[in-house]
Image: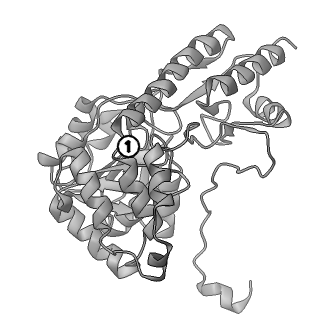
Amino acid sequence: MKPWETNIRKVVPYVPGEQPDQQHVIKLNTNENPYPPAPGVMESLYAFDADRLRLYPDPEAKVLVNALAKRYRVKPEQVFVGVGSDDVLAMAFLTFFHADKPILFPDITYSFYEVWADLLRIPYRKAPLNDHFRICREDYDTANGGVVFPNPNAPTGELESLEVVEDILQHNQDVIVIVDEAYIDFGGKSALPLIEQYDNLLVVQTFSKSRSLAGMRIGYAFGSPELIGYLNDVKFSFNSYTMNQLTLTAGAAALEDEAYFRKTIHKIKATRERMKEAFRELGFVFGDSQSNFLFVTHPRAAAKELFEALKQEHIYVRYFAKPRIDNYLRITIGTDEQMDILVDFLRTYLKK
C-alpha cells in the first residue's frame, strides 16, 4: 500500500445493470420502461429556451415540487426531489441514520443500501426474508437506528400489504422508517397516506420506471414537513443545484398526462401477467411479482448458464451472484414483441 492510500475511504461499490453499447439488443436487465415518455415531455423540451441554460436552476426545484404536490395532493413542504431515487435515498441515509444502533433492512433487497451504509459508516443488520421472500415483521420489533425496505421488494418483486408496513411503523416510532416505492405504480397501495399519521415516515418514489424517464434521473420523497426540512438542509449543504433546468421541465410535464401514464402502466401489467402464464408453462418458479419484472428460477436450468446463453442472443437480463438468489434471474417486462422473442428462445433452450 502506498503511504497516501492509508487515509483513502475504500468501499465495495454498487454494480449497476450492464448497459450494452451494441444495437439491436433486447434489454431486460435494468427495469427500464419499454415505452417512451408522455408526449408532453418531448413538447416541453422542444419548447425549452436554450438561453436559460446559462443560468443556474432553481435550487428549490419549485416547478417540480409544486407539480408533485398537486399530483399527489400533498403540501409542497412535504415533497423532496433529487437526482433519481438513488440520490434521494443517499441523502436520507446521510441525514437520518446516525445512531450507534444498526439500521435494519432485508437480506435480499436493493444492494445499494449496504453500499451507502458502508460508505457512510452506518452500522446495519440484515433481516432475513422468509422462504417465500417476504418480510418477517417481528425482525423489525427490536431496537435499531432506522429501517429501510423496498415495497414491492427488489429484486424479488414481492409486495407487502399496508398492514405490514404500518405494523413496522408502529414498532419503530423512535427512528426514521423509509419505504422505497420505486415499483409501487405497478401494483399495490402506496404508503403515502401514512405520512399524515406517522411523522417519522419517508416514502421514496421515482420517475425512472413507471414514467419512462430513467435517463432524466428524477426521484422524490414524501414526508412530514420536519423530515423534508432536514433533508433539504443536508442537500443544500452538499450541493444546492442538484437538478438541471431540462430535468425540472421534463419532470413537471410528465405529471400532466395522467391518461398516458395509466395507459402505459396497464400495458406493462397486462404483459407481466401474460408472461407469468408463459413462464409457468415453461416450468419456471416465481412469486407473484407486483413490479415491472419477474424474478424466476428453473429446476432444470442453472441461472448463470441461462444468463450467459441469453446474452449470446443479445437478450440481457439480470443475474445476482449472491447467497439465496444465485439461481434466479430478474427479467424486466419489455414490449410484447420483446417478451415473445424471449419466450421463444427459452422454449428452445429448455428442450436441449
Q: Is residue 347 above or below residue 22?
A: above
Outermost residue, left side: 197
**23 relative to 137 in the view: left or right:** right
- Asked if residue 189 lies left or right of residue 156, the reply is left
Identify which residue is drawn at 57% across, 42% down: 32
> Which amino acid type is marked by label 1?
Glu
- Rendered residue at 51%/17% (across/down): 273
Residue 318 location (% of width, % of height): 66, 39
Residue 155: x percent and y percent? 53, 38
* Mark 1 element type: loop
Q: Inspect this view and state whether residue 280 appears.
A: yes
Question: Who is closer to the viewer here, 339 or 136?
Answer: 339
Residue 350 position by quadrant: top right
- Split into 4 quadrants, where in the image is the C terminus? top right
> Which quarter of the rendered picture does the N terminus lie within?
bottom right
- In the figure, residue 162 lies in which quadrant? top left
> Residue at the spot x=20%, y=59% of the render?
76
Q: Residue 87: in sight, yes or no?
A: no
How packed mark 1 is, by other alpha carbons closer than 10 Å (few <14, some 14-19, many 20 or more), is many
* Location of mark 1 (residue): 181
- Outermost residue to the top: 281
Spot occupied by residue 190 in the image (x, y as percentages of width and height): 29, 37
